[in-house]
Image (cartoon, rainbow, N blue to C red):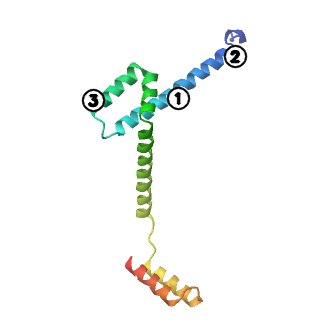
Amino acid sequence: MPLAATSYPFLEVFWTVLIFFAFVIWIWLLWVVVSDLFRRPQTSAWVKVAWIVALIVFPYLGVFVYVIAEHNGIAERRLAAEEAATGEFDQYVKSVASQPDPAEQISRAKQLLDQGAIDSSEYERIKTKALAG
């Protein structure tokens, strides 16, 4: 027998969705707080344990107090982690990118010199740079 529309009215559906999304947001905030807490090298283990206990005993209050108390630190640690990840990625890309062949660079510079696009001093500079590696 199908559910009748009166057994689950619109406001109950709305309330259920609202509670579900509040729970998902809290889980996300909890993840952010716990990951930030363990990213803090200057914080002692006892302080970390105290925060974890506070998060278990007072789940919503603990998350909100941590976010209010550490909002600048959270942003700075996130930014530092993102910059480190970007630097590592850039270094990896540079390490696997193909380096142009010095002979190829010199021949391109010679073509530009012959076409008159560069002068002899620029050609010598490009040649020196290509041979230097």
As shown in the figure, which amino acid type bears the numbered disc 1?
A: Ile
Quadrant hosting residue 35: top left
Which label lies toward us, 3 or 2? 3
- How far from the left and from the top, in percent, is residue 6? 71, 9
Instruction: State whether residue 70 is above or below residue 123.
Output: above
- Dot 1 surroundings within 10 Å: few (below 14), some, or many (20 or more)? few
Which label lies toward us, 2 or 1? 1
Q: Secondary structure at mark 3?
A: helix
Cα gap from disc 1 to disc 3, whole angstroms: 27 Å
User: Which quadrant of the rendered structure holds the C terminus?
Assistant: bottom left
- Dot 3 surroundings within 10 Å: few (below 14), some, or many (20 or more)? few
Q: If you read the primary sequence from the N terminus, does the residue marked by circle 2 or circle 1 appear first?
A: 2
Q: Is residue 48 left or right of residue 73?
A: left
Q: Is residue 16 left or right of residue 72?
A: right
- Tell me the tag on residue 10: 2
As shown in the figure, which amino acid type bears the numbered disc 3?
A: Trp
Identify the residue under disc 1: 25
Q: If you read the primary sequence from the N terminus, does the residue marked by circle 3 or circle 2 appear first?
A: 2
Identify the residue under disc 3: 46
As shown in the figure, which amino acid type bears the numbered disc 2?
A: Phe
